[in-house]
Image: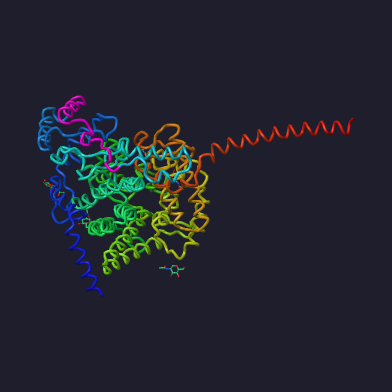
Amino acid sequence: MRNLNKFALAILCCCLAALPQFGARRLLEFSTESPNAIADDEFGTYNFTSCQIYCYGSLLDTVQMAKLFEDSKTFVDMKLLFSPQKTLEDFDAFMAAKNNTPSRDEIREFVDAHFGAKGTELDVWTPTDWIEHPGFIDLIHDPDLKQWGVDLNNIWKELGRKMKDDVHKNPDYYSIIPVPNPVIVPGGRFIEFYYWDSYWIIRGLLHSEMYTTARGMIENFLSIVQRIGFIPNGGRVYYWGRSQPPLLTAMVKSYVDFTKDDLFAINALEILEHEFEYFINNNTVQAKGHNLVIYRDTSTGPRPESYSEDVETSQSFTTKEAKEDHYSELKSAAESGMDFSSRWFINANGTNEGNLTDAKTRSIVPVELNAILYWNAKMIAEFHSKAGNIEKMVEYETKAQKIQEAIQAVLWNEEAGCWLDYDLINEKPRNYFVPTNLSPLWVKAYNLSESEKISASVLKYIEANNLDSFPGGVPNTLYNTGEQWDLPNVWAPMQYILVEGLDNLGTPEAKALSQRWGQRWVKSNFEAYRETLAMFEKYDAENFGGHGGGGEYGVQTGFGWSNGVIIEWLAKYGRQISLSNTGAAARSCRLITVLGATAVAIVGAFAGRFIWRNWFK
Ligand SMILES: *[C@@H]1O[C@H](CO)[C@@H](O)[C@H](O)[C@H]1NC(C)=O
Ligand SMILES: *[C@@H]1O[C@H](CO)[C@@H](O)[C@H](O)[C@H]1NC(C)=O
Ligand SMILES: *[C@@H]1O[C@H](CO)[C@@H](O)[C@H](O)[C@H]1NC(C)=O
Ligand SMILES: *[C@@H]1O[C@H](CO)[C@@H](O)[C@H](O)[C@H]1NC(C)=O
Ligand SMILES: *[C@@H]1O[C@H](CO)[C@@H](O)[C@H](O)[C@H]1NC(C)=O
């Protein structure tokens, strides 16, 4: 039997190898052509020449500490006018000439002479597979929401970007990581692609029937894993050392679910396994005798894109080692995608009160990262099964089972009735609400035979935390610290995890809550859109139609993942949801009151006359 499978697989592989349009082969070709990466083995490791300018070193330190730009990210997105080597030589000469203490103006002159404008590596690109009227529009009944669906579909054209040829010819002159296909970016200050954002963007694209663009973005990520060994936080070399929640396998799964192109997933398997093993090999810790994964970072120094900010918070620490540790905690939080949040604070008394100096990301076992790795193992097993490779399927099913056991043993909390992050320093669960506490529901990382019991527990947890009380969506935490991943901010991907998770749970109560939260999110986003004609990076839990603020930078619009989630939910709820339930319903309610009052008055008048005539006359 096993031999037969191997034989079938061998034939399949031969067929695939003969088809140049399929994934792996073409990707390999790209990776060997890419002049920017140094690939040792089959999978490359991170080593970009332009990192000497953009990732670390004295030039970066000098320029960023001069605070020439309002947003620290501006400088690291600027193009080099000369090679990194000449730039560094000129910089050394410049520093020597200025006695190592150049003035701010002199530094500005140096930057002006050696760097061009930011963001010049990308051209606006109209997706070639964009269509005016994708099928999901027809699923929306309310006319205002239907028009909104059309508008959102249009926004993909504004967020499309393609790399200039010069990036491929002279990658050393840019901080951008070259990729073969055009991308959809989040928007605002985020002018390049980001890793986990792309999951919700790609789902939106698939609903918009833009299969080529979606596939192109996935192929970019596959090629990045081949060249670098993992997917950095975003498409810039300065994100070296940190990834983001690993959703590449889920992107492939989404694409295959929409297109039925199983071969695409089968061809990607080697790369998907590599990324899975990367996380397991590099991020694993032990808790209560189980292996679990944490967020971490392998680079040194402050975040290049927020350099002076990190140096400032590091002032609380005296030794070089303590400062480095602090930077690592911040960059690990960036790997989680939740930068920043009280979720990552552990202070001396073991609670979440504090500020960024209390960030202890590497000592917190995060629920969703383990849940996502469980999911990845399940999907990889499924793709192997489709390829007929039973041995590999069993191998990955077993890995998934191990992760599920660890999640159950360490992260499930019977008292709270939910999963909780685990504090490795104080060896105790962290009973603070984060939407990710419910992420096992989203990826079904629990014993499915116990759905009823889990549903009852989780709904009690939701009630105890009063999560249904927010008009603008479920906030990211219940603590207002001024950080952007805290109260009152609400984020589309987190609403997605909650709503899809409760839907998956399948009990009538969980499904009803899922629908209420999903529709509330659509209506609240629409209210913000109606008022501002913009889609936001984050919204405001405490105000229906409000949008978010706080954190390190101004409010960003665009916005990739928000659009993706709304498009998916317009497709999902479009038949039932109606704005007239809110606005027009209130209007018709008033109308009925007015008509009713008039009727009572008329009837009363007649009755009065009748009574007057018959009894009192
Ligand atoms: C990166 O490559 C340069 C040469 O281009 C080399 O000197 C350096 O050691 C490499 N760094 C790593 C981390 O491999
Ligand atoms: C991460 O894991 C991969 C194998 O999956 C290994 O080759 C690599 O050296 C690891 N990197 C670090 C920084 O530990
Ligand atoms: C963080 O809190 C500590 C006290 O716990 C304080 O000394 C420090 O100044 C605060 N840092 C920032 C950046 O607010
Ligand atoms: C824990 O420490 C913080 C300051 O770091 C303080 O504000 C808080 O009251 C303390 N909480 C408890 C329960 O001791
Ligand atoms: C799942 O739950 C059922 C019902 O409680 C139980 O019989 C079974 O042993 C559980 N399976 C695992 C793997 O824990």
State the residue at coordinates (24%, 49%).
Answer: 221
Check the image and name the residue furthest to the top: 105
Q: In which quarter of the image is residue 592?
A: top right
User: Looking at this view, is 426 or 538 the one in front?
Assistant: 538
Residue at position x 50%, y 62% from top? 453
| Quarter of image, res 57 | top left
Residue at image position (16%, 59%) is 18
Q: Where is residue 500 in the image (x, y as percent from the top left)?
A: 43, 52
Would residue 230 be found to the left or right of residue 433 on screen?
A: left
Please provide the residue range marked out in magenta: 102-129
> Extreme right residue here?
617
Residue 550 appears in the figure: yes
Where residue 127 appears, as percent x and y from the top left, is 28, 40
User: Dividing the image into 4 quarters, which one contains the N terminus?
Assistant: bottom left
Q: Quadrant of ligand 3?
A: top left
Residue 614 position within the rendered picture, expressed as x and y whole percent measured from the top left = 87, 33
